Image: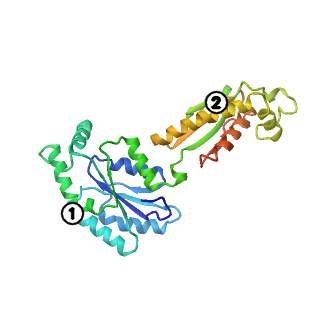
Amino acid sequence: MTNHAAAPEIVIITGMSGAGRSTAAKSLEDLDWFVADNLPSAMIVTMLDLARRARAEVPRVAAVVDIRSRAFSTDLKSAIAELDAIGAHPYVVFLEAGDETLVRRFENVRRPHPLQENGRVIDGINAEREQLRGIRAEADLILDTSGMNIHELRSRVREAFGNESDTAVRVNVLSFGFKYGLPVDADMVADCRFLPNPHWIPELAPQNGQDRAVKDYVLGQPGTEEFLHAYLEVLQVTLNGYERSGKHFMTLAVGCTGGKHRSVAIAEELASRLAGPWPGVQVSHRDLGRE
């Protein structure tokens, strides 16, 4: 599948129990898709109709369907045919894994396979694989998750269904004052208290780091550019790692004593420089105006 000008209006996620349907669904939710989990096949067309009526609020929809319905195969094929008839060609994603992997996953969570009845887990797996044979043959994308961990599966889903702004880590650059405490949600903390404090300059004290005079003062200090350059290099390595591991959000906290001058100016500058390679960067100032 190519990103993303011709993205499908609706995605159907199905496949083997234990192969990662829930993880794939969560990954689509993280990409701002509306996902209906465990939806009866007969309700897929109704869900799409409701989504079309609320187009601005629900731009992309996905349905997770499984074999808990005894008429699963027949119902799903009928739903796909009905969607095709109204011009909403669904993109079917089929998740599978090898028998040993599926057995191990069910044993790890100590849950029975939904089709094993009084038999063994492998009996349920074999029954399900046979039941899904026809759907698998018609799937648009087959993902074998045998050798994947959760992060790798999420990455594959993002590659298939996310655009550049979806898949990039969203960064919130947050200025704060150390005297008010560290932000509890900070992933990384930058301390700029080593810079001279504009608070001690009478004409700058009433202003803040968003004002040009304060910003020029802070950014013009010896060591500021070296700090920004070095920190951006560290951020680039970290954000690349976040992206590979499937993390979608990062909060970078930038602190000075009161959260009014230095941290505000540095946070604004870091956000400005990050915004090019990382779409969706936001900047906020927790303690600005608190003094």
Q: Amino acid at mark 1?
A: Ala
Tell me the crowding category of disc 1: few under 14, some 14 to 19, or many 20 or more residues within 10 angstroms, Cα based.
Answer: few
Residue at 16% of width from left, 45% of height from top? 122
Relative to 179, 145 lies left or right = left
Which element type, helix, strand or loop, lies under badge 1? loop
The residue most toward the left is 118
Residue 257 horizontal/vertical position (percent): 71, 26
Relative to 99, 153 lies left or right = right
The residue most toward the bottom is 85
Which element type, helix, strand or loop, lies under badge 2? strand
Relative to 283, 202 lies left or right = right
The residue most toward the right is 203
Please name whichever residue, 272 or 46, is drawn nearer the observer in this view of the structure. 272
Residue at 33% of width from left, 58% of height from top? 39
Residue 112 horizontal/vertical position (percent): 20, 43
Q: Amino acid at mark 2?
A: Ala
Q: Which residue position is annotated with label 1? A: 71
Q: Is residue 86 visible?
A: yes
Mark 1 and mark 2: Cα distance apart in space:
57 Å
Residue 277 horizontal/vertical position (percent): 61, 46
Q: Which residue position is annotated with label 2? A: 190
